[in-house]
């Protein structure tokens, strides 16, 4: 019951966040985004207590680092943005370590990494002149880590089957495209209206994979 209450609360908070973005209400954005991220941390922490997944703590770490990243990205300075990238990059590494506890098809991982990098190369090329010089190579490094996390999620197999980890990681990756365009190509509400639901949905799906080992279906996210 408490998990359902938390998910409903997160949905309402996310709706408030998107409304705040539409109204460009700074205080509403800060409060609702922080609240949504904190609720996600609490939700995943409670799931980890009930889970038999031996690496559940890594998922909690990933979600917590994501929450810190969310808060850092509320800042307007380059330093805050860089701090946010570091937090999210460490979160992606935590996810990779957690995925390593499952069976991984390494050929698919390598192929997926290369295939994902092709469109991302053109995205970075498109953004390059608008990225501050001091952030350019950190952004490249972040994209490589994000791509590795997504490719690893796509290569995970449980009982030989693909899982929802692939979907969660893909949503996360796409959401970061909207973060980048909003940051470097001009602030537009559509970036937040699409990016925020994708991001929190991706985090939710990725995080709830920690209970997969206690379910009867590898496709079941909760």
Image (cartoon, rainbow, N blue to C red):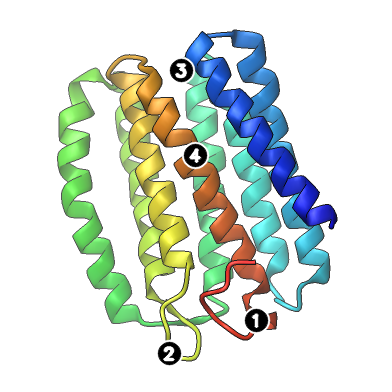
Mark earlier in primary sequence (2, 1): 2
| Residue 100 position in % (x across, y down) | 52, 75
Report the side of 105 relative to 101 (left or right). Answer: left
**Label annotation for residue 160:** 2
Do tag 4 and tag 2 residues touch (Cβ < 8 Å)?
no
Mark earlier in primary sequence (1, 4): 4
Quadrant location of the N terminus?
A: bottom right
Identify the image quadrant of residue 137.
top left
Which residue position is annotated with label 3?
78
Q: Where is 40 relative to 101, above or below?
A: above
Between label 1 and label 4, give the one nearer the viewer: 4
| Residue 107 position in % (x across, y down) | 28, 80
Q: Is residue 94 visible?
A: no
Which residue position is annotated with label 4?
197
Which residue position is annotated with label 1?
213
Mark earlier in primary sequence (3, 1): 3
């Amino acid at each position: 019951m408490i998990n359902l209450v938390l998910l409903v609360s997160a949905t309402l908070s996310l709706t408030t966040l998107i409304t705040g973005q539409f109204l460009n209400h700074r205080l509403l954005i800060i409060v609702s985004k922080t609240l949504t991220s904190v609720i996600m941390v609490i939700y995943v922490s409670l799931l980890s207590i009930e889970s038999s997944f031996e690496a559940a703590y890594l998922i909690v770490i990933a979600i917590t680092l994501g929450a810190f990243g969310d808060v850092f990205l509320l800042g307007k300075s380059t330093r805050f943005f860089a701090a946010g990238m570091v937090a999210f990059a460490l979160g992606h590494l935590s996810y990779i370590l957690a995925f390593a506890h499952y069976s991984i098809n390494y050929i698919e991982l390598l192929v997926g990494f290369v295939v994902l990098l092709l469109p991302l190369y053109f995205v970075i090329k498109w953004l390059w002149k608008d990225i501050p010089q001091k952030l350019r190579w950190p952004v490249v490094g972040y994209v490589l880590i994000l791509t590795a996390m997504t490719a690893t999620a796509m290569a995970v197999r449980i009982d030989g089957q693909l899982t929802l980890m692939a979907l969660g990681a893909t949503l996360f990756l796409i959401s970061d495209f909207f973060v980048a365009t909003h940051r470097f190509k001009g602030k537009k509400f559509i970036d937040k209206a699409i990016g925020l639901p994708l991001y929190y949905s991706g985090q939710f799906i990725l995080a709830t994979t920690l209970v997969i080992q206690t379910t009867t279906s590898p496709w079941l996210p909760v």
